[in-house]
Image (spheres, rainbow, N blue to C red):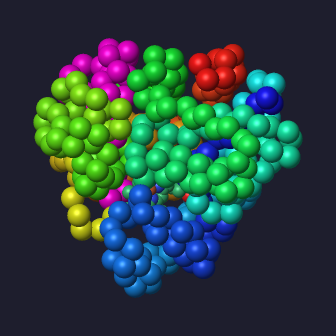
Amino acid sequence: MKKGILMVNLGSPDSPTPKDVKTYLGEFLMDERVIDVPLWARTLLVKGIILNTRPKQSAKAYQKIWWENGSPLIVLSEQLKEKVQEKVDYPVALAMRYGSMTIKKGLQELVDKGVEEVFLIPLYPQFAMATTETILVLAEEVRAQHFPNVKIQDLPAFYNNEDYINVLSNSIQHHLKDKDYEHLLFSYHGVPERHIRKSDITKSHCKIDGSCCATPSPAHEFCYRHQCKEVTRLVAEKLNLKPDTYSTSFQSRLGFDPWLQPYTDRTIERLGKKGIKNMAIVTPAFVSDCLETLEEIAMEGEELFHEVGGKEFTTVPCLNSDQPWVDLLAQWINDWAKTPVNA
Ligand SMILES: C=CC1=C(C)c2cc3[nH]c(cc4nc(cc5[nH]c(cc1n2)c(C)c5CCC(=O)O)C(CCC(=O)O)=C4C)c(C)c3C=C
Ligand SMILES: [Fe+2]
Ligand SMILES: [Fe+2]
């Protein structure tokens, strides 16, 4: 059976205009795994409230980071795909969960090349209902409806993979080698606390307290909070970071429900007010730089830090298409391709 690879990231609007941003946000936020309330309530919230105000505001943010050749997230994911393609003998396609680069088009591209067995790589280190799960569910729906003879296997969350932690740690070390930072903040995209409870397969483990994520449990296979905290712990261990010189926070909250805490903006504020002058920030929930890293962190975050007395604010870029990351993806692909079918 001919093998192929489908890498999937989140997606971006076609352009940074309010109209295109509205179309994109409409699809994104109507996903029942992103805003997980009953359809009538989601429709009211998204179409009746959010889409009347947010697209204008988001479009302004997108305009600040948009590149000549398009959305940074798309351009960087395309560069990643090209570089992985150079390293493996199987056709590699790229798709986005939302927007015009659909999973259906990505699968079609592979099928047109004769592919019958697909390795699906969600481009997220940690599992979340709003990211990995929604990709897997949609890919299976599309497969069953349009490509019933195709077999799909997916790459599980790789947050604690030793090689991934090495690549991430080396990247952080490289970008901060000449920086005299006092605090390294690991900022992950947030999710509503409710999402963590919904993904708890034990139905009772995740209390979202000080200890549940550090207490071994089968729930952690699908616990985004645990997986984020593990990335911080493993990188800190690898880089020999001293306690109190690093911490974890969650960014990009939307709406009024409680999201994972501590929030990144409040943490930046607290660090500045505490007298920290030089801080660095890394965003390991994203493999490609995007609106959330380039605008919310590198622009808004820096401004906030300066407002509260901070001086130097260094952002570590995402892994993007760095060669060690490309090499690692190629290694995972080759390992998958060597595994006998049904093994
Ligand atoms: C209920 C809303 C949202 C959840 C839950 C959520 C989870 C989540 N998102 C990412 C990654 C990205 N999100 C991005 C943008 C973005 N996210 C939301 C909302 C939720 N995300 C919105 C409304 C937006 C659009 C921008 C805005 O209006 O603020 C992006 C950037 C996309 C880009 O084009 O650059 C990424 C990437 C993760 C990893 C995650 C859960 C773990
Ligand atoms: Fe998001
Ligand atoms: Fe947990």
Q: Is residue 81 above or below residue 218?
A: below
Q: Is residue 264 left or right of residue 127?
A: left
Q: Position of residue 224 (x, y in %)?
A: 34, 40
Of residues 10 and 196, the one nearer the viewer is 196
Q: Position of residue 83 (x, y in %)?
A: 74, 32
Q: Is residue 323 left or right of residue 18?
A: right
Q: Is residue 166 left or right of residue 88?
A: left
Quadrant position of residue 194: bottom left
Q: Is residue 38 visible?
A: yes
Q: Which quadrant would the C terminus be assigned to in this image?
A: top right
Of residues 93 and 13, the one nearer the viewer is 93
Q: Is residue 119 left or right of residue 58?
A: right
Q: Is residue 308 visible?
A: no
Q: Residue at x 60, y 79 (%)?
A: 19
Q: Is residue 152 magenta?
A: no
Q: Residue at x 51, y 17 (%)?
A: 163
Q: Is residue 44 above or below residue 121?
A: below
Of residues 232 and 29, the one nearer the viewer is 29
Q: Residue at x 59, y 54 (%)?
A: 141
Quadrant position of residue 207: top left
Residue span colored magenta: 224-253
Q: Position of residue 212 (x, y in %)?
A: 17, 34
Question: Quadrant holding ligand 2?
Answer: bottom left
Q: Residue at x 41, y 24 (%)?
A: 160
